[in-house]
Image: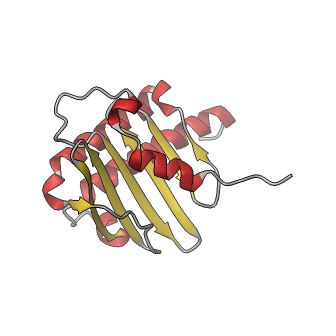
């Protein structure tokens, strides 16, 4: 039995599905209502998706991930916070029409707005060090991962 990795389809959906089809209602459609944070590793990419309604997902290009976290307050709150931080950093981003995957050690942020996608990238080490202008967005995306890990730990009984 062969299984197909749904990563690229899920990623494309997160990057391209119109807000209306996602049933997202936002107060200011000029600000981001969705954010993809993509982290490049030597063996693939991790994609963290966060939407303004608190929906969040994690996708691994190697397969696997987590969806449906909006039912859990910690994931929902982290996703909303990630989108809010992206709204504060739109001046650090530029319009994007192509959506390449990051290389090893690179982080690319794609923010969805009604006007289109805006993007920015930086080395992961610079972002993690806290001195980069986009570090707050990197930390906000990491909070989504942390919230998912806490769910997994509680489900397996490991802390």
Residue 158 vs residue 39, the one in the foreground:
39
Residue 135 position within the rendered picture, expressed as x and y whole percent measured from the top left: 26, 59
Residue shown at the point (26%, 50%) measured from the top left: 116
- Of residues 126 and 63, the one nearer the viewer is 63
Residue sitting farthest toward the left: 91
Identify which residue is drawn at 16% across, 33% down: 28
Q: Give coordinates of residue 53: x percent, y percent.
A: 35, 29
Q: Is residue 15 left or right of residue 94?
A: right
Task: Please identify the quarter of the rendering in which residue 23 is found.
Answer: top left
Q: Is residue 54 visible?
A: no
Vertical placement of residue 15 versus 83, above or below = below
Instruction: Tell whether 2 sits left or right of 138.
Output: right
Q: Residue at x 34, y 47 (%)?
A: 35
Instruction: Tell me which residue sits at (65%, 55%) in the image.
Output: 63
Coordinates of residue 32 in the picture (x, y in percent): 24, 43
Q: Which of 148/158 is in front?
A: 148
120 over 29 or under it: above or below: below
Q: Is residue 80 left or right of residue 148?
A: left
The reply to whether residue 117 is in sight is yes
Coloring basis for residues? secondary structure
Of the 4 image quadrants, the one containing the C terminus is: top right
Rendering coords of residue 144 (x, y %): 42, 43
Q: How many marks?
A: 0
Placement of 105 over or under 139, stated as above or below:
below
């Amino acid at each position: 039995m062969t299984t197909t990795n749904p990563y690229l389809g899920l990623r494309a959906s997160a990057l391209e599905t119109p807000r209306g089809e996602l049933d997202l209602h936002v107060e200011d459609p000029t600000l981001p209502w969705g954010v993809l944070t993509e982290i490049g590793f030597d063996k693939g990419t991790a994609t963290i998706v966060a939407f303004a309604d608190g929906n969040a997902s994690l996708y691994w290009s190697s397969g696997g991930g987590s969806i449906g976290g909006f039912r859990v307050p910690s994931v929902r709150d982290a996703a909303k916070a990630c989108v809010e931080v992206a709204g504060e950093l739109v001046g650090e981003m530029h319009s994007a029409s192509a959506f390449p995957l990051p290389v090893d050690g690179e982080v690319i942020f794609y923010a969805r707005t009604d006007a289109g996608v805006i993007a920015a990238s930086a080395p992961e080490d610079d972002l993690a060090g806290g001195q980069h202008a986009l570090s707050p967005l990197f930390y906000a995306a990491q909070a989504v991962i942390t919230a998912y890990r806490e769910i997994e730990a509680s489900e397996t009984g490991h802390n």
